[in-house]
C-alpha cells in the first residue's frame, strides 16, 4: 500500500484541482471558439441598409429580408 503524509496528500489534491480547472477552462474556451465561428458563418449584414440577420441555409447568395438586395456569404 502507498503511504502518504498529510503534506503530500494536500499537495497532490492542490495539483489535481489545478489541472482539472485548467482542463475545463481549455475545453470551455475551445467550445466557445467553435460556437463563435459557426455563428459568424450564419450571420449576414446587408451593405446597403445595414440590416443584420441570420440565415442557416447553405446558399452562397441570399436576399436581404429588409431591402431585398442580394448579399454574398462572407468567407
Image (cartoon, rainbow, N blue to C red):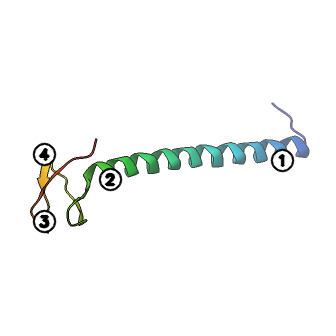
Q: How far apart are the two marked residues, 3 and 4, measured between alpha carbons?
A: 15 Å
> Nearer the observer, disc 1 or disc 4?
4
Q: How far apart are the two marked residues, 2 and 4, measured between alpha carbons?
A: 16 Å
Residue 41 lies, in percent from the top left, at: 28, 48
Q: Residue at x 25, y 52 (%)?
A: 42
Left or right of 65? Residue 24 is right
Q: List the single residue furthest toward the top.
A: 1
Give the labeled residue for mark 3. Answer: 65
Mark number, residue 35: none
Q: Quadrant of residue 49?
A: bottom left
Q: How far apart are the two marked residues, 2 and 3, measured between alpha carbons?
A: 18 Å
Q: How far apart are the two marked residues, 1 and 4, measured between alpha carbons?
A: 57 Å
Give the labeled residue for mark 1. Answer: 10
Give the labeled residue for mark 2. Answer: 39
Give the labeled residue for mark 4. Answer: 59
Q: List the single residue furthest toward the front.
A: 48
Marks 1 and 4 in Cβ contact (< 8 Å):
no
**Viewer-proximal residue among 30 and 61:** 61
| Mark 1 / mark 4, whichever is N-terminal | 1
> Nearer the observer, disc 3 or disc 1?
3
Q: How far apart are the two marked residues, 2 and 1, measured between alpha carbons?
A: 43 Å
> Nearer the observer, disc 2 or disc 1?
2
Amino acid at each position: 500500500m502507498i503511504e502518504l503524509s498529510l503534506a503530500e496528500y494536500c499537495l497532490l489534491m492542490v495539483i489535481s484541482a489545478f489541472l482539472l480547472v485548467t482542463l475545463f477552462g481549455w475545453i470551455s474556451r475551445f467550445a466557445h471558439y467553435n460556437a463563435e465561428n459557426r455563428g459568424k458563418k450564419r450571420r449576414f449584414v446587408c451593405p446597403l441598409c445595414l440590416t443584420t440577420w441570420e440565415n442557416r441555409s447553405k446558399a452562397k447568395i441570399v436576399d436581404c429580408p429588409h431591402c431585398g438586395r442580394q448579399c454574398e456569404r462572407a468567407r
